[in-house]
Amino acid sequence: MNEHAYSDTLPGAQQKAPLSSLKNVLIIGSQYLQRLSIDIHNTPAVFQGLPPQLHLGLIVDVTARQVSDEQSGFEVSLVIRAQGMRTAPSETDPSPELVYDIAMSYAGLFGFNTSMERTQAEQALLVDAPHHLFPAARTVLLNTIREAGFPTLNLQPIDFEVLWKTRRA
């Protein structure tokens, strides 16, 4: 398991222990909302007869790109598309009524204190980094749903390792 260090800015991030005693430390920099849009269908009629709980369909993706030549120059984006539906899709109704459609991208700056193999760096950026981004992204998503006037729900954590392995396969 990787150890993690936090810094408000990546350049010159200080560690509490000498670098030689740490293995593959992921340095966490600024986190920010890149993009957020919501489309509410059929307003204001959509609010009539809302069920107590909507079905939430999620599509999640993680991207990473190098933004500088240094080891500490990576931007990781957690891209989420959330669709609220009156009912869950089924064989008889594969496309239930869509109530809202949210597209968001929540990102952060990450780096490493040492050089590492490509596979290790990829795993750190596409598994460990989104693990740090998810709590804030989940808060933004659930607050947006609530502020739009819809019932909220409990969104469970995402297993980014499974997502990464599935994407690689």
Image (cartoon, rainbow, N blue to C red):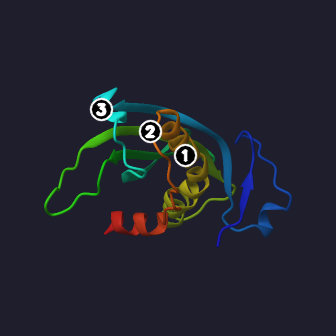
Say which mark, if any, is on residue 41.
3
Q: Are marks 2 and 1 in contact (CB under 8 Å)?
A: yes
Badge 1 density bin: few <14, some 14–19, many ≥20, Cα 10 Å: many
**61 to the left or right of 41:** right
Say which mark, if any, is on residue 137.
1
Residue toward you, 78 or 168: 78
Badge 2 density bin: few <14, some 14–19, many ≥20, Cα 10 Å: many
Residue ID at (22%, 49%): 96
Kind of element beneath mark 3: loop
Say which mark, if any, is on residue 104.
2
Residue toward you, 60 or 107: 60
Is residue 53 visible to us here? Answer: yes
Badge 3 density bin: few <14, some 14–19, many ≥20, Cα 10 Å: some
Q: CA distance from mark 2 to mark 1?
A: 8 Å
Q: CA distance from mark 2 to mark 3?
A: 17 Å
Q: In which quarter of the view is residue 167 placed?
A: bottom left
Q: Amino acid at mark 2?
A: Met
Residue sitting farthest toward the left: 92
Residue ID at (57%, 55%): 129
Residue sitting farthest toward the bottom: 1
Q: Amino acid at mark 1?
A: Ala
